[in-house]
Amino acid sequence: MSALFNFQSLLQVILLLICTCTYVHSTWPTLLNKNKTGAFGVFWKFARIGERLSPYVAIGCFIMAFKVLSS
């Protein structure tokens, strides 16, 4: 089953994208800052979410990790 049709898998993909984009933005800020608009602007927005809501993203990652390990 595709990640688009399974809600838990969709949440995992979104959390992984947020964490990855935040890491890339902290390592190479110019890579995402030059693409604030357009199709690649989504990755910049994911990085912003990861920076500003980092405690909630971390809690979400822990919850997803326990759900994956328990299933």
Image (spheres, grey):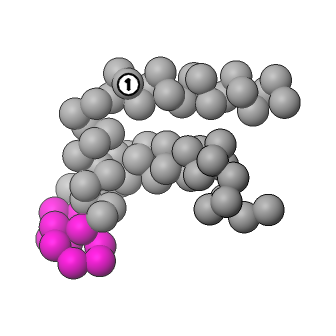
At a point 35% along the width and 21% down the height, the residue shown is 55
Residue in the foreground of this view, choosing between 49 and 27: 49
Residue 60 position (above or below residue 44): above
Q: Which residues are magenta?
A: 31-41
Residue 58 position (above or below residue 18): above
Q: Report the side of 41 relative to 21 (left or right).
A: left
Q: Which residue is mark 1?
A: 56
Res 64 seen here: yes
Residue in the foreground of this view, choosing between 33 and 66: 66
Residue 51 covered by magenta stretch:
no
Assign the magenta stretch its main secondary structure: loop
Q: Quadrant of the N terminus?
A: bottom right
Residue in the foreground of this view, choosing between 10 and 27: 10
Q: Quadrant of the C terminus?
A: top right
Q: Position of residue 26 (x, y in %)?
A: 27, 46
At a point 29% along the width and 77% down the height, the residue shown is 39
Res 16 seen here: no
At a point 16% along the width and 73% down the height, the residue shown is 37
Q: Quadrant of residue 44?
A: bottom left
Q: Position of residue 4 (x, y in %)?
A: 62, 62
